[in-house]
Image: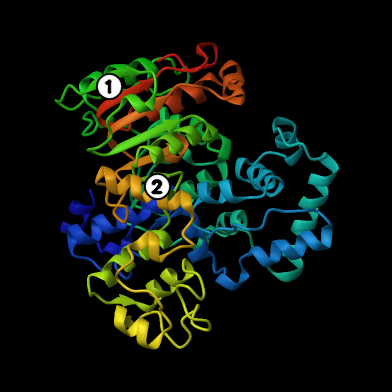
Amino acid sequence: MVDEALEKGISPQNIAFLAFTKKAANEAKERAALRFGLDPKNDLVNFRTLHSMALMYSGIRPDEVMQSEHYRELATATGVSLVTDSVTEADDLIEASKASDPILGLINLARLKKTSLRAEYDRSSLSDDWLKVEYLAKALHNYKQRFGLYDFTDMLQVFIDNPQVCPHFQLTFLDEAQDLSPMQWDIAHILDAKSDKMYVAGDDDQAIYRWAGADVDHFINLPGGSETLSQSFRVPKSVHLLAESVASRIQRRFPKRYDPKEELGRVARCATVNELDMAHGSWLVLSQAGYQLQPVANDLKANGYLFNYRGSRSVSEKVSAAVNGWEQLRKGQEIKGSVARQIYSYMSTGSRIARGFKKLPGVEDSTLLNLAQLQLQHGLVVGDELIWHEAMDKLPERDRAYIVAMLRRGEKFNGVPRITVSTIHGSKGGEADNVVLFTDLSPAADADMRVNADDVHRMFYVGVTRTKQNLYIVEPEDISRSYDL
C-alpha cells in the first residue's frame, strides 16, 4: 500500500505509520527507507510510535518530560519509596510499563484505561495501602503542575485535549492495534478524522497486553470493512493445526482463517531442554513466567551455548570485548583504547598492570594500541605468553568456565546469539526456526485461567506461532498446573 501511494505521487511526509512499540516502528521505517530509497530521518518522520507522535506534535519539549531525578525528588518530598532506576524514553508503552514503579504503574494504568484509580487498585494485587496510593497520585499531579512537567501518559492526554495539533495525512497505517489502550484509541480516532484513508492492522488472537491496559474489544468492534490476510509466511502446517486448536478456545475473538506455509514442520514433546541439540539454527525458549527460565539459562551455560537471556547476552559485551581484544593483541593486531581499558579492569595491579596505569590515563577510547605500545608506554607487565584467562586473572571464574565451555563447543562467544530465552510476552514479534515452549503456569496464571481464560489462551497462541519449522513442547513439572497443549 505504501508502494502504491508513492507511485501515485503521495509524498512520504503525508504518510503516517504508527506502531505499538519502538522496535516495530523502527523496523517499518528501515524497510520503507531501504525499499524506496528514502531518508528515514527526513522522509519518514511520521513512522513512529503513538507516544512519540503525541510528543512531537503536542509541543512538549524534552526538558519538560519527567526524568528519574524528578521521581527521586518526589519520593523524598512525599516520603514514599519509589523505583526510579529505569525511567525509559517516552516512546514505548510496554518498556515503560515494565520499568515503572508499581504504584506509579497503577496510576498510569488507570489513566490509560480511562478508569478510576480506586477501581484499578481494587483489581490489583498491590500490597500498599489505598491511602498511600491516593496520596502519591495527588502529590504526583501537584508536582507536575508546579514545575510544568509531563509524564509518559500526559503526552497522550495533551494530544487528545488538543486534536488540532494533529496534521492532515493522506494515508495512515496503525499496526498491532489489538494492543492499544482506551486512551491510545482516542488518538487513533483523531488520526482517522485527520486522514483521507486509514488502515488498522492487528490480530486479536495475539492480544496479550491486557495487563498494560490493552482494549482488544475496541479493536474487534471497530467499524468499517475488514480483510483477513489469508497466508502465513512463518507457520508450517503441523504447527498451524495446533495453533488453530488453541485459537478455537478463545471465547471473545474475531473469527478468521489463514493458510500455513507449504512446509510440514514438526511438533514434538520432550521431558527437558537438555534432550535437544541446539548446535544449529535459531532458537526461542519460551515460558509463561520469568522465574521458570533460570534453570534453562543455567543448563545452556553448562552446555556452552551462547544465548540472549531476557534481553541481555549470556556473556556480557564487556567480557566478550576484553577476551577478544586480548587475543587480538596476541596476534599482533591493534585494539581501541576503550577495549584496552576493559582488559585492564580484569587484571591485577602489580602482577599484570604497573601501579598508576590501571585506568590507562591519557588514552582516548578511540586510540589504537598494540601489545608493544601497552607494554612500553602504558604499564602492561605481561605479554603474549599468557592466554586470555591467564592474563586477565581477575576475570570471574564463572565467566572463565563459561567461555571455555563455549570454545570447546565451537561457539563464537563474541558473535550474535542464535538462542533467545524469554517469556512469551517478551517474545512478541519475534520468530525462530525452532521454538521450545514450557507449558507450566505460575500460581497467578493458573488462577487467571479461571477468571480470564482468554488471556492465557492468547498468550500460548503467541508462543506456538513463533516457530518457522519445529515446535518442542516441554512436559510440565506439575500437570495439574499447566496449559494443555
According to the image, label 1 marks what residue? 239
- In the picture, measured across the screen, residue 364 lies left or right of residue 218, that is left
In the structure shown, which secondary structural element does the residue marked by tag 1 occupy? Answer: helix
Look at mark 2 in the image and give the residue it sits on. 402
The correct choice, above or below, for 74 with respect to 288 in the image is below
| Chosen colour scheme | rainbow
Q: Which quadrant is the C terminus positioned in?
A: top left
Res 33 seen here: yes
Residue type, numbered disc 2: Tyr
Task: Measuring from the top left, give residue 452's x and y in whole percent.
Answer: 57, 21
Q: Residue at x 28, y 19 (%)?
A: 267
Assign a secondary structure to mark 2: helix
Residue 297, image quadrant: top left
Front residue of this view, candidates 394 and 263: 394
Residue 308 appears left or right of 55? left
Looking at numbered disc 1 in the image, what kind of residue is underneath it? Val
Q: Nearer the viewer, residue 420 or 20?
A: 420
Q: Residue at x 57, y 47 (%)?
A: 97
